[in-house]
Image (tube, rainbow, N blue to C red):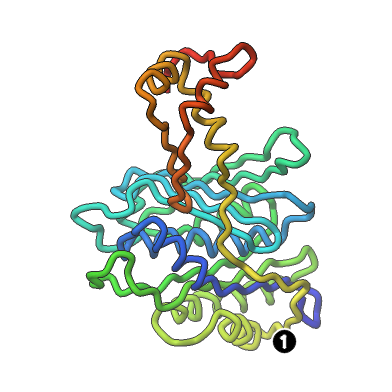
Amino acid sequence: MDAQQEVVVRTVSLSRAVSTVADRQKLSPIATQAVGEALVCAVLLGGGLKDEGEQLQLMVRGDGPLGSIIAIADRQGICRGRVSHGAPSPPPSSVAKGIGEGLLHVVRNNPSRGGRPYNASVPLPAGGSIAAALEHYMVASEQRPALFAAACTVPLDAAASPPPLLRAQGYLVEFLPGASDATRAALAAAHAMLAAQLTSTPVSAADAAALLLKEGGGGGATLLSRASPAFRCTCSHERSAGAVRMLGTEELRSAVAEARNLEVRCEFCGAVYAITPRELEAMLEPGGGGGGSGAR
């Protein structure tokens, strides 16, 4: 928080986590860039969550060749993400064209406490970014004006899959209720100039945020909390078995009769779980939970 108590500033460097996601899902350069920007935004916004165990989920649903993008983060920066089409062909020339027109959904929930999740949606700006859509969300749904910058620098002509990742980072400047109009205008003007530097220059998000405050007359900033953002998946054999139970009696019996495993692949980390015929037989027993209709 700055010396004048007008803004809260968060920065994040997420290069290692995004590299892990790209490697696990074998993403193309443009898909890596899109997921990287979504994860940076999710970690930045998730840093403001109040309750332990609470999660923030961003769902980007556009009509472009990348399909849907999901990014999930908690208050500590533990995150995971995925994209529907990790290697579209031909590849779109930009993230905006890869996403297309659609909606950004923001979901807050706390699985440990149950209850109904908070869900809000805003349109994706034409030719804009996930960060720009989140700025609109903050005003329209939370009445908390903010500035977002998210960048994932990837060589778009890289032949390797996953591609070499240079940097994934971003910053969030959230205006407090007492922020003056002059501060808002000055920081917005500086942000318009500095956000692009995250991709065009070697500047770090922390340095860009500090320069933003200096250019905008906001003074220095102090981090309210420090997190160690990292990729971590929540998949497990137990959860995979639960998904298999939903396949229905007919498919379970067929697998048992053929003595074959049913495999479940995690869409976030790529881990494959084999559910054995013995486990399937247990599901078919009374009370085993394998009595679905067979519909996927």
**Relative to 7, is 148 on the left or the right?**
left
Closest to the observer, 178 or 219 = 219
Q: Position of residue 175 (x, y in %)?
A: 70, 67
Q: Is residue 180 visible?
A: no
Q: Residue at x 50, y 24 (%)?
A: 280
The residue drawn where x is 49% and y is 49% is: 70
Horizontal and vertical percent position of residue 69? 44, 49
Query: Relative to residue 79, is residue 9 depicted above or below?
Result: below
Residue to which mark 1 is pinned: 219
User: Is 77 left or right of 127, judged from the image as shown?
Assistant: right
SS class, disc 1: loop
The residue lying toward the viewer, choosing from 155 and 222, is: 155
Choose top left, top right, bottom left or bottom right for residue 97.
bottom left
Q: Is residue 208 left or right of residue 152?
A: right
Visible residue check, residue 120: yes
Question: Which quadrant: the N terminus?
Answer: bottom right
Does 55 sit left or right of 130 as displayed? Answer: right
Q: Position of residue 176 (x, y in %)?
A: 76, 66
User: Which amino acid does the dot numbered 1 rest on?
Assistant: Gly
Q: Categorize mark 1 by other alpha carbons within 10 Å: few (<14), some (14-19), many (20+).
A: some
In this picture, is 178 found above or below 201? Answer: above
Q: Residue at x 60, y 82 (%)?
A: 206
Residue furthest to the left in view is: 90
Q: Is residue 224 above or below residue 115?
A: below
> What is the quadrant of the C terminus in the image?
top left
Q: Position of residue 262 (x, y in %)?
A: 42, 32
Q: Kindly identify the residue that appears in the image at 56 percent across and 46 percent down.
A: 235
